[in-house]
Amino acid sequence: MIKLLLALTLLQGQPLRTIAIDERLADDARISIGDKLVVSTKPGARDGDTVVVSAIIKRTADPSDIARSEYVVRMHLDQLQKVAGYGDRVDKFAVATRGGAATDRALREINAVAFGFEAHRSRDIAVETSQTYQVVSRFHKAIGVITIVASAIFLLCIMLLKVEERRRDVAALRLMGISRATVVKGIVAEAALLALVGCALGVVIGWASSSFINWYYRGVYRTPLTFSLVTADIVVLAVSLSLVLGIVAGLLASLRLVRTPPLALFGR
């Protein structure tokens, strides 16, 4: 069974053969299982092969299908040969092998059959066709790194301002005999708690945004492809970064404050 773009026209009558059509084509043309069609190379022609729709194919999660707005029809090979006028020729075919040694042997034998044959491993083809997505992935990683660095600087500034507002509180604690280490631990614990709360809110917002993105673009492109994904690894990384950055920001801000004499904190 091979994919092919075809012109299809509804027709009443007895079906001769069966075909399967893409679910997008079924929705757009309002075709149901059991409908009679004429398969031809020209739109509206009634002199082609009369067929009946026997199945509706669910779209797969293939990123390469997103850029193409093509309809897909699957038919028997002899039907395809007649409609395409290709005869006993194919552009490409797939061969299943067992094990790496069998794959290497098949590659050598197929490439040595005749001039014009060229065999490749399926994973090599997948890597070659996914270069665009790898570039996009690297671009997203670069944006992520820049965002994390900018967030760390912003968090440090916020913590410095927050701690500066508590100069008198820290001075009072110091004059009461509270040690510098205790004050630092308190500020760091508060910063870590705030970081965890902010991270929890971020995870919830990220999950909600991801769900909306998938719902919207799946409807636009009519595909089960996942456009946005929040995994456990991403959550663990986000929580870890948030906690570490919060602790570091709180530590730097508190050390700057406790090194100042208490009376100086009171402005004297």
Image (cartoon, rainbow, N blue to C red):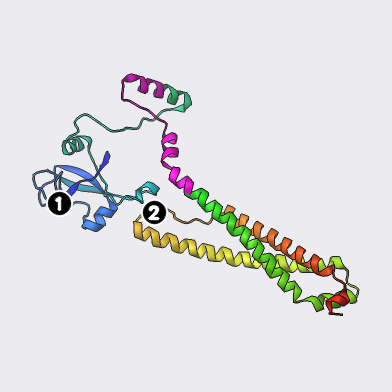
Give the main secondary structure of the magenta stretch: helix
* 7 is higher (above) or lower (below) than 173: above
Check disc 2 and give the amino acid type: Pro
Taking the view exactly as shown, the residue that stands out farthest to the front is: 268
* 159 is higher (above) or lower (below) than 81: below
Q: Nearer the viewer, residue 89 or 39?
A: 89
Distance CA(mark 2)–CA(mark 1): 28 Å
- Point 22% across, 38% down: residue: 76
Q: Mark 1 highlights which residue?
A: 9
Instruction: Please state, as top left, top right, bottom left or bottom right, where the N terminus lies in the image.
Output: top left
Check disc 1 and give the amino acid type: Thr
Is disc 2 placed on a helix, strand or loop? loop
As drawn, is 261 to the left or to the right of 61? right
Is disc 1 placed on a helix, strand or loop? strand
- Point 35% across, 48% down: residue: 65
Q: Is residue 150 visible?
A: yes
Disc number for residue 149: none
**Is residue 133 rendered magenta in the image?**
yes
Residue 196 x/y as whole percent: 66, 65
As drawn, is 13 to the left or to the right of 186? left
Q: Is residue 185 visible?
A: no
* 108 is higher (above) or lower (below) than 188: above
Decide which of tag 2 and tag 1 comes sooner along the chain.
1
Instruction: Please state, as top left, top right, bottom left or bottom right, where the C terminus lies in the image.
Output: bottom right
Q: Nearer the viewer, residue 108 or 13?
A: 108
Taking the view exactly as shown, the residue that stands out farthest to the left is: 47
Residue 200 x/y as whole percent: 61, 65
Residue 53 x/y as whole percent: 21, 48
Q: Mark 2 highlights which residue?
A: 224
As drawn, is 66 to the left or to the right of 245? left
**Is residue 134 rendered magenta in the image?**
yes
Q: Which residues are magenta?
A: 106-135
